[in-house]
Image (cartoon, rainbow, N blue to C red):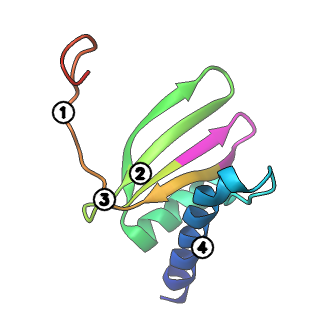
Amino acid sequence: MARDFSFRWVKLAAVGAMMALPAIPARAQIICGGHDVLVARLAAAFEEKRLGYGVAGQSAIFEVFVSASGTWTILMTDVKGQSCILAAGEGWEDTLATPVGQPGG
């Protein structure tokens, strides 16, 4: 329980730091660690599961984790295996994929 509680505050701090990024010159802290550790903490603290992922060239993989309650996290893992939480929040809504060129796509 103590781990869940402290990680919730860490995630809230990360969200606050990400929101403050435009106002702070390049010194904002982002939460980083081992991929398995961060994924386990997201699952334990927020019941988030991976919704999907995308590859950014040969430099990183971006994953989106969401929970049934609507919390979400974007996790980036670089080629060295270092993972960082880039953004997190609440109010996730699933939408149907719309083909490019169609209204809403």
Q: Quadrant of the C terminus?
A: top left
Tell me which segment is drawn in magenta.
75-83
Residue displayed at 50% across by 84% down: 5
Local packing at callout 1 (Cα closer than 10 Å; few below 14, some 14-19, many 20+) is few
> Of marks 1 and 2, which one's residue comes earlier in the chain?
2
Instruction: Please tell me in which quadrant of the rendered image residue 76 appears.
Output: top right
> Of marks 4 and 2, which one's residue comes earlier in the chain?
4
Image coords of residue 56 (percent x, y): 59, 25
Kind of residue at disc 1: Leu
Residue holding disc 3: 91
> Of marks 3 and 1, which one's residue comes earlier in the chain?
3
Residue displayed at 55% across by 75% down: 7
**Alpha carbon of mark 1 to alpha carbon of mark 2: how far?**
17 Å
Image coords of residue 2 (percent x, y): 54, 89
Query: Contact, CB < 8 Å: mark 3 with mark 2?
Result: no
Kind of residue at disc 2: Phe
